[in-house]
Image: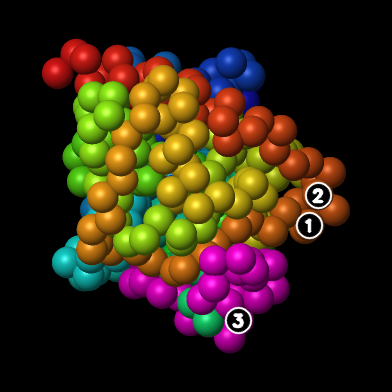
Amino acid sequence: MKKAIVCGAGGFIGSHLVKRLKSEGYWVRGVDLKLPEYSKSLADDFIIGDLRDPVVCKNSINFDFDELYQLAADMGGAGFVFSGENDADIMHNSALINLNVIEYAYKAKVKKVFYSSSACIYPEFNQLSEDNPKTEESSAYPAQPDSEYGWEKLFSERLFLAFKKNYGIDVRIARFHNIFGPEGSWKDGREKAPAAMCRKVSETSDGGEIEMWGDGLQTRSFLYIDECLEGVRKLMDSETFFGPVNIGSEEMVSIKYLAEIIMEIAGKKQKIKHIAGPLGVRGRNSDNSLIMEKLNWKPSYSLRDGLILTYKWIDEQVKKK
Ligand code: NAD
C-alpha cells in the first residue's frame, strides 16, 4: 500500500486530496494547524501542528513516504492577498513552511514531492489587459509577480527545484489557477471570487443588489477541485515530466459574467453595485498547451458545471447560519 503525507490537509484542496488518495487505496497522513472545517478528514492519521516549527516537520515527515504533497500556506483570495495588509505573514509563514518541509522530505528520503505553486507567479506586465493575458510556463521570467504571495511562491518553486538539482529529490510543481468547489472558504475573508459571488447571490433576494469589486470586466479562469486533483495525480504519476506546469481552465470569463452565471443557476436576477476593492491583475487565463503536450490532459468540466455544485453547497451553508 502506498503511503502519502498531505501538508495542509485541513485546507480546501488538501482535504479533497486526502479523499482522492484514500479512494485510490493510499494510507494517508494529514498535517495542518487545524482539521477540515466542513467534513471529517478521511486521513488515517492526522497531526495537528505548525509546519513553521522544524520539530513538527521532523516528527511528521518521519519516514520515507512514497509521496508528499505540500499544500500548506498562509493564503486567501484577493481580499487577503492583494490588500497588502497580510504581506509579511504571507511571505514569512509560507517560506518557513516550505523551507522546513523540503528539508525534512529530503532527510526522510521521501520518494516524490509535490509543491503547489500559483498562477500569481506570472509577471504583471503580461496581464495588463483583460483579453490576452500570457501565462505560458516559460513566461515566468523575467519575474514580476503582482503580489508578495506570488514572489514567495516563485522563491519556493526555486527552493524545491534547487533540492531536486543538488540532492536528487524527485520534485514536481504545478501552478494552480483559481481552484474552486464545495468545502472551501466562503465567508472568512479568505474566500475567492466564485465562493464570494455564490454567497452574495445566495444571501440576497431576487431583485436585490450585490456588490462587486471593480468594474467586473477583469477576467479570470476557474478550475473545479476534482479537475485540479486529476491534474495533480497525473503529474505525480508521470515518469518523464515534472513541471512547473499550469493546472487551470482555459475558459476565461469576466467577473461580471461569473456573477451572471451564478444568478442564473440560483434563479435570481440581481443588480450589481461596483465598489472599490483589491483586484490583482486585469486579465488572467491558464495556458494549457504544456500540460496537454506532456501529460495529454486538459480539464473537461465547464465552469457552469462546477458552479452548480459549488452554489448548491454555499446556499446550504448560508441557510444553516
Ligand atoms: P487553504 O488555505 O484552504 O489551505 C491551506 C492550509 O494550510 C490551511 O488548512 C491552513 O491551516 C494550513 N496552514 C497554514 N499555515 C500552516 C502552518 N504553519 N502549519 C500547518 N498548516 C498550515 O488553501 P487551498 O486553497 O487549499 O490551497 C492549497 C495550496 O494551493 C496553497 O499552497 C495555495 O497557495 C495553493 N494555491 C491555491 C489556489 C486556489 O485557487 N485555491 C491557487 C493557487 C495556489
Q: Is residue 48 visible?
A: no
Q: Position of residue 276 (x, y in %)?
A: 23, 63
Q: Relative to 270, is 300 on the left or the right?
A: right
Categorize mark 1 by other alpha carbons within 10 Å: few (<14), some (14-19), many (20+).
some
Circles 1, 3 touching at the beta carbon (< 8 Å):
no
Q: Dot 2: what SS?
A: helix
Answer above or below: position of 52 versus 99: above
Q: Relative to 278, is 218 on the left or the right?
A: right
Amino acid type at circle 2 is Met
Q: Which residues are magenta?
A: 126-149
* Of marks 1 and 3, the one in the foreground: 1
Q: Position of residue 157 (x, y in %)?
A: 53, 66
Res. 230 mark: none
**Which residue carries the number 2 mark?**
292
Q: Nearer the viewer, residue 19 or 219?
A: 219
What separation in Å lies between label 3 and label 2 (alpha carbons)? 22 Å
Q: Nearer the viewer, residue 300 or 90?
A: 300
**Which residue carries the number 1 mark?**
289
Q: Position of residue 86 (x, y in %)?
A: 20, 64
Residue in view at x 38 percent, y 46 percent: 193
Circles 1, 2 touching at the beta carbon (< 8 Å):
yes
Coloration mode: rainbow
Q: Position of residue 127 (x, y in %)?
A: 54, 72
**Which residue carries the number 3 mark?**
141
Categorize mark 2 by other alpha carbons within 10 Å: few (<14), some (14-19), many (20+).
few
Pick out the residue farthest to the bottom.
142
